[in-house]
Amino acid sequence: MSLRGRRRMKSALWALVVLVSIALTLWGLWLTLFLFGYQDALDREMAGHDLILLGAVASAAAATWARLGHHGWPVTLAVAAPALLVGLTDLAAGGSLLPHLGGLVAVPAAFTGLLVGLFGAPGAEFSEAEGNRHV
């Protein structure tokens, strides 16, 4: 496999980790949001908190991978937003709506970080020799 093929494979795997973290976070937030009474409310809430924690771990892993992969700090922080804004607030105040409010900011930020990490920021030049994006 050529060097370009390896880079594309690494980028695709990184994007998959980011998408999995977003999906787990959203699924967990959905399970912990109570608008109506449910018979199995406690089981549903516990499963939701577990999924939020898994999403936060995946988000932290994707952010670490982004930083080690020479992405800039904005991409790293955007991808880490679900871990910071949803995961930590769920651990601190799991019974409140604070994780859901954090999700309103964190999920779009993570998706934006994914797009910028894959395609680059508008106006950024890509140096094939160095493999980095320069603004």
Image: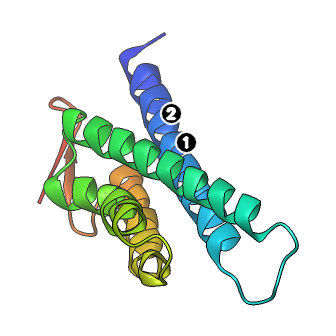
Q: Is residue 116 visible?
A: no
Q: Is residue 79 left or right of residue 14?
A: left
Q: Residue furthest right?
A: 39
| Classed neighbour count for the residue bearing mark 1: other residues with Cα under 10 Å, few (<14), some (14–19), many (≥20) | some
Q: Residue at x 56, y 58 (%)?
A: 49
* Neighbours of disc 2 within 10 Å: few (<14), some (14-19), many (20+): few
- Mark 2–mark 1 CB contact (< 8 Å): yes
In percent of the image, x 82 and y 85: which residue is there?
Answer: 37
Q: Secondary structure at mark 1?
A: helix
| Residue behind mark 1 | 16
Give the x, y percent position of residue 21. Answer: 51, 51
Which residue is at 39% across, 55% downward?
Answer: 119
Query: 88 left or right of 11?
Result: left
C-alpha separation, residue under disc 2 versus residue under disc 1: 5 Å
Q: Residue furthest top?
A: 1
Would you identify the image quadrant in which residue 87 lies?
Answer: bottom left
Q: Helix, strand, or loop for circle 2?
A: helix
Q: Considering only vertical position in the picture, is 32 above or below 88?
A: below
**94 left or right of 132 in image:** right
Query: Which of 4/108 is in front?
Result: 108
Q: Dot 2 corresponds to which residue?
A: 13
Q: Report x, y in % for residue 106.
A: 40, 71
Identity of the amino acid at label 1? Leu
- Residue at left 22%, top 68%? 123
